[in-house]
């Protein structure tokens, strides 16, 4: 019986990296809707991500270097930067930014292969930049302006801070949060349309960055974090983030409105340097989103995928918009066996159809 293509690529990568096989169990998916698409053997991954410009996987290695991972799981060295603390991609250009944990700088790796030091100093003394993010253009908060890049400085023997900088202009950094004793070890940072979150090794786990630079612990009344090393905004939600708890070996879904925390996957080997080891990529044109999870301790990168619901499936009236007319049609036929108001095409109008309309409400389908 022939081996599946994906299994062949994984086995080839294991042999190429000197691995004799997997001595551990793969993480267990808990949240419905996700499927394991790919496993890549990779030495000490830091911040693996998908570059939307070319669709390929990239990762830093704590062992040194930033790499492009090809579809056959072979790698290309892009930069020999040492002590990689984080990796970020500018989705508009495809340029990569890698942070150096020691002695402390950020370099830009251009799509043309050029490598240049981009931010070479944050403050006097020890700099330890790790996880980074770009504040989305849709951001309506008041911490920084949309399009600004942020980086967490874990301050190994110096201040624990948050800094802002520009992806367009080198050496344009400024402090957002200066050390006031709140943070223990900030390892990553993320932003959605309204909120900037810092992942910290403290028991608080996640902190909200306020306009004045102060930090507020995210209230999660029913969950205790162990040691959060990574955080990223869920592009399919207005309120949710994904966080990797390196202490518990879990990837968690965190709702910033309610403080609710649920387990997305579990079974990662707990590690001491899992910085930035959860990222997401959403291709709305193809209707698929991917979750990229690195596990430095096991030397593997996992890629999970899920379908992105089409909001225009809720245009049950066919007027090129999801609005009150669609909601009213669903409500008028609720509980009936009919095609009128049947958004999911199963011949019945029920709660599924109502939820589809609510989820897609306001979509322009013209």
Image (cartoon, helix red, strand yellow):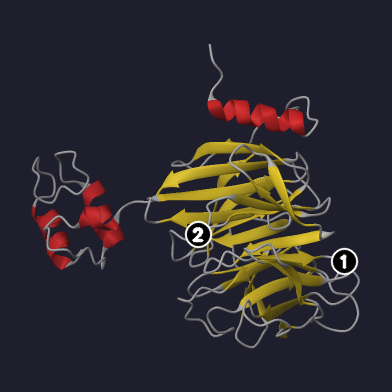
Q: Is residue 136 above or below residue 39?
A: below
> Closer to the observer: label 2 or label 1?
1
The foreground one among 38 and 244 is 38
Q: Is residue 154 visible?
A: yes
The foreground one among 68 and 331 is 68
The residue positioned 56% from the left and 19% from the top of the image is: 3
Callouts 2 and 1 close, C-beta under 8 Å: no
Q: How many marks?
A: 2
Earlier along the polypeptide chain: callout 2 or callout 1? 1
Dividing the picture into quadrants, the one containing residue 116 is bottom right
- Residue 51, label in figure: none
Q: Is residue 3 above or below residue 323?
A: above
Image position, residue 365 (x, y; %) = 22, 63
- Residue 234, label in figure: 2
For this view, does 305 lie left or right of residue 25?
left
Image position, residue 141 (x, y; %) = 51, 81
The residue positioned 70% from the left and 72% from the top of the image is: 151
What SS does tag 2 mark? Answer: loop
Image position, residue 170 (x, y; %) = 70, 81
For this view, does 234 lie left or right of residue 171?
left
- Local crowd at mark 1 within 10 Å, few (<14), some, or many (≥20)? some
Please name the residue that numbered disc 1 is placed on: 102
């Amino acid at each position: 019986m022939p081996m599946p293509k994906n299994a062949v690529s994984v086995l080839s990568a294991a042999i190429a990296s000197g691995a004799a096989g997997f001595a551990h169990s793969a993480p267990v998916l808990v949240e419905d809707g996700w499927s394991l698409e790919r496993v890549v053997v990779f030495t000490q991954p830091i911040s693996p991500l998908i570059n939307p410009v070319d669709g390929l996987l990239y990762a830093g290695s704590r062992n040194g270097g930033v790499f492009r991972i090809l579809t056959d799981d072979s790698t290309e060295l892009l930069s020999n930067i040492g002590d990689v603390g984080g990796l970020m991609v500018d989705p508009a250009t495809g340029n990569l930014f890698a942070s150096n944990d020691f002695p402390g700088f950020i370099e830009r790796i251009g799509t043309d292969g050029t490598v240049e030091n981009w931010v070479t100093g944050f403050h006097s003394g020890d700099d330890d930049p790790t996880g980074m993010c770009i504040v989305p253009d849709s951001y309506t908060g008041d911490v920084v302006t949309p399009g600004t890049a942020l980086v967490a400085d874990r301050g190994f023997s110096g201040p624990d801070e948050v800094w802002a900088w520009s992806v367009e202009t080198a050496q344009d950094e400024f402090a957002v949060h200066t050390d006031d004793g709140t943070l223990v070890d900030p390892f990553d940072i993320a932003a959605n349309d309204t909120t900037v979150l810092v992942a910290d090794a403290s028991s608080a786990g996640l902190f909200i960055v306020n306009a004045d630079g102060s930090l507020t612990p995210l209230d999660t009344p029913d969950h205790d974090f162990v040691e959060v090393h990574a955080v990223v905004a869920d592009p399919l939600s207005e309120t949710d983030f994904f966080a990797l708890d390196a202490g518990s070996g879990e990837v968690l879904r965190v709702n910033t409105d309610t403080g609710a925390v649920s387990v997305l996957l579990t079974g990662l080997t707990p590690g001491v340097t899992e910085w930035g080891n959860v990222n997401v990529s959403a291709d709305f044109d193809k209707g698929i989103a991917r979750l990229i999870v690195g596990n430095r301790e096991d030397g593997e990168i996992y890629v999970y995928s899920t379908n992105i619901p089409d909001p225009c499936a809720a245009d049950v009236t066919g007027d090129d918009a999801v609005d009150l007319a669609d909601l009213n049609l669903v409500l008028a036929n609720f509980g009936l066996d009919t095609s009128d108001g049947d958004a999911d095409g199963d011949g019945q109008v029920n709660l599924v159809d109502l939820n589809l309309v609510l989820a897609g409400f306001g979509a322009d389908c013209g």
